[in-house]
């Protein structure tokens, strides 16, 4: 939008006033800044996560995440997508009791479940073929906003930590500020930094990949983003082709390499589902760079968490 406005002024407007020249200068500065922030999510940037060449099936696992849109009733198309992708772990959000009934057939194929259906657009349904160890539903900052915290035992026997999030977005009908959203993400980020175990975070974070908060989260947590150097993989808004942003995310520690990452088909929601396959490879931890926060970032993260109470 900034680029189109700038081009329109340059090609169609003559005799610019001093104020208009100032406006164009600020617009160009805005365009350069946004380009700088978004550049890592283009194929021209260096990949943050290495591509896996490991062929051992027992060390790899797949996850599918879908924000279903609570009012959406096209469950059959979603189930077709799930059947085709056949993930080891399935997480759906905005799922109420109706959606739990529609997806109940997966309780046979996925013997490990965490079912937190809610009628406030923050329900979560979690299905796993892999063994879950001490799965918990936690309400980190709000009694109505759940998150799922669990350990997962891979087929190789290796245990990893998994966190599933869907914080409340900063929106007039939801929350007037981003304080709680930022704090919830950062609380999980700090937890990972203090935990040496392999770690994966997934969910609808209601924030674009290149936002200040997401970059802060990565530095605080040390987690890597497989999108970096590969593309935007925009997931929202599924119904508006010219207004799409990456709001649904997977982050993981340096113990993993990427096997596959895809945005999946439209199924009636305002979000596209996303699929990832990761490979746990011990040597990856020494061959991939871990991110680190400086003292100013640590202070900023602490202040955000304190402000949220």
Image: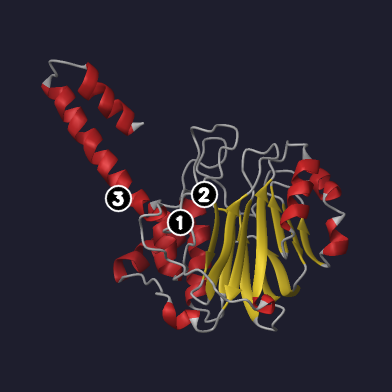
Percent position of residue 297, x then y? 34, 65
Residue occupying image coordinates x 85% and y 60%? 107
Q: Which residue is mark 1?
A: 230
Q: Nearer the viewer, mark 3 or mark 1?
A: 1
Tell me, for residue 63, which label it has, or none. none
Q: Which residue is mark 2?
A: 233
Q: Nearer the viewer, mark 2 or mark 1?
A: 1
Percent position of residue 278, x then y? 59, 69
Q: Which residue is mark 3?
A: 36
Percent position of residue 279, x then y? 59, 73
Please report contact status of discs 3 and 1: CB closer than 8 Å, yes or no.
Answer: no
Percent position of residue 38, x then y? 37, 49
Image height of 88 relative to 264, above or below: below
Q: Is any part of residue 38 visible from this angle?
A: yes
Q: Is 68 in front, or is 178?
A: 68
Please report contact status of discs 3 and 2: CB closer than 8 Å, yes or no.
Answer: no
């Amino acid at each position: 939008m900034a680029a189109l406005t700038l081009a329109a002024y340059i090609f169609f407007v003559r005799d610019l006033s001093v104020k208009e020249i100032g406006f164009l200068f600020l617009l160009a500065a805005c365009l350069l800044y946004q380009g700088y922030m978004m550049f890592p999510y283009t194929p021209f940037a260096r990949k943050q996560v290495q591509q896996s060449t490991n062929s051992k099936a027992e060390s790899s696992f797949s996850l599918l995440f879908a924000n279903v849109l609570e009012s959406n009733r096209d469950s059959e198309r979603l189930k077709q997508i799930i059947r085709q992708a056949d993930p080891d772990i399935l997480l759906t959000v905005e799922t109420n009791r109706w959606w739990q009934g529609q997806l109940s057939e997966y309780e046979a194929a996925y013997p490990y479940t965490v079912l937190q259906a809610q009628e406030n657009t923050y329900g979560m349904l979690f299905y796993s073929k892999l063994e879950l160890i001490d799965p918990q539903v936690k309400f980190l900052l709000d009694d109505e906003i759940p998150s799922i915290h669990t350990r997962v035992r891979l087929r190789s026997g290796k245990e990893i930590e998994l966190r599933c999030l869907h914080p409340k977005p900063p929106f007039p009908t939801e929350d007037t500020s981003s304080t709680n959203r930022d704090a919830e993400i950062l609380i999980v980020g700090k937890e990972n930094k203090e935990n040496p175990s392999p770690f994966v975070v997934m969910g609808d974070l209601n924030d674009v990949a290149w936002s200040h908060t997401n970059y802060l989260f990565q530095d605080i947590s040390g987690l890597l983003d497989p999108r970096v150097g590969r593309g935007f993989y925009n997931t929202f808004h599924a119904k508006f082709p010219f207004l799409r942003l990456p709001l649904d995310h997977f982050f993981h520690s340096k113990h993993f390499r990427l096997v596959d990452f895809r945005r999946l088909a439209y199924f009636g929601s305002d979000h596209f589902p996303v699929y990832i396959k990761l490979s746990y490879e011990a040597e990856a931890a020494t061959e991939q760079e871990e991110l680190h926060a400086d003292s100013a970032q640590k202070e900023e993260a602490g202040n955000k968490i304190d402000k949220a109470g």
